[in-house]
């Protein structure tokens, strides 16, 4: 691993993202706008909004970063940029970590902006610590980024990359515990949700929102999220190849 190669890739990808105004608008503006719309969907029911909105901080970053990362990485492959990098004496892990760090920086800005809107302008109140909620949201974004890198290895076009999103996201949305507690679901769905990363994002967010103290449950959820992130990055290193 070469840290200089990693950060050179990070600088290049960040520069490209910053100059891609549409992508930046999608990443930075859509989550706060959606949260604001939800505020007025539950207009008059402040308690329900306060219970749902913070949980979305564990969901929106994963979805947004998965979509953008998978498409942006595939675009790099289709343009030949990734192919040229792979011909250089640079380890594939250095290249992919550079992508990971770049998207993670953008994810941090996205999550921070969403938290600012939610807890300041929309006046959402929680029992837990905002810093812990922010940490979980950032890990959720990192998880979406690493999963997007892995998904991009199996797509041959941007349309195919977009198609992966419903296959990867929708089953997790239905079984993560957002709509109902997982204990009330069918046994096979409970079992399936134990192997899906979004489950732990939602569980960790709920723990961070509802409890002011750092619990063992929160620790376990975060460790599982980190394990998924490392696993997806490792699978990306093995799976991603030059685009034919």
Image: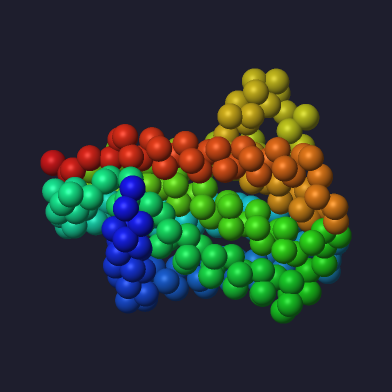
Q: What x and y, as percent, mark residue 22? A: 37, 72
Give whichever of 150, 231 is nearer the camera: 231
Q: Residue at x 44, y 47 (%)?
A: 146
Q: Viewed as shown, does residue 221 lie left or right of 20?
A: right
Q: Residue at x 15, y 51 (%)?
A: 88
Q: Relative to 143, say whether 27 is above or below.
A: below
Is residue 17 visible to the viewer in this orientation of the structure?
Answer: no
Q: Viewed as shown, does residue 144 lie left or right of 36?
A: left
Q: Viewed as shown, does residue 180 lie left or right of 236?
A: right
Which image quadrant for residue 236? top left
Q: What x and y, as percent, mark residue 85? A: 19, 53
Q: What x and y, as percent, mark residue 73? A: 31, 53
The image shows a total of numbered marks equal to: 0
Q: Viewed as shown, does residue 242 lie left or right of 115?
A: left
Q: What x and y, as percent, mark residue 4? A: 31, 61
Give whichever of 81, 244 is nearer the camera: 81
Is residue 87 visible to the viewer in this orientation of the structure?
Answer: yes
Q: Residue at x 51, y 63 (%)?
A: 107
Q: Residue at x 78, y 69 (%)?
A: 124
Indicate the colouring scheme. Answer: rainbow
Give whichever of 31, 212 is nearer the camera: 212
> Residue at the bottom extreme?
121
Which image quadrant for residue 182? top right
Give whichever of 211, 44 is nearer the camera: 211
Q: Which corner quadrant holds the C terminus?
A: top left
């Amino acid at each position: 691993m070469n840290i200089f190669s990693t950060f050179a890739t990070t600088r290049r990808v960040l520069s490209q993202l910053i100059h891609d105004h549409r992508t930046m608008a999608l990443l930075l503006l859509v989550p706060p706008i959606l949260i604001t719309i939800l505020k007025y969907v539950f207009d008059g029911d402040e308690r329900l909004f306060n219970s749902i909105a913070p949980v979305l901080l564990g969901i929106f970053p994963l979805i947004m970063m998965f979509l953008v990362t998978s498409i942006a990485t595939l675009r790099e492959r289709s343009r030949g940029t990734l192919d040229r990098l792979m011909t250089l004496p640079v380890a594939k892990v250095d290249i992919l970590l550079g992508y990971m760090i770049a998207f993670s920086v953008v994810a941090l800005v996205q999550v921070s902006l969403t938290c600012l809107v939610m807890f300041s302008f929309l006046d959402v109140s929680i029992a837990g610590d905002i810093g812990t909620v922010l940490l979980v949201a950032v890990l959720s974004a990192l998880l979406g980024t690493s999963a997007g890198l892995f998904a991009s290895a199996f797509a041959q076009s941007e349309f195919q990359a977009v198609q992966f999103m419903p296959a990867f996201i929708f089953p997790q949305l239905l079984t993560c515990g957002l709509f109902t507690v997982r204990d009330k679901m069918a046994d096979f769905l409970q079992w399936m949700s134990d192997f899906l990363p979004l489950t732990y994002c939602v569980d960790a967010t709920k723990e961070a929102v509802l409890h002011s103290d750092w619990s063992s449950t929160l620790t376990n959820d975060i460790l599982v999220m980190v394990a998924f992130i490392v696993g997806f990055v490792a699978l990306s290193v093995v799976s991603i190849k030059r685009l034919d």
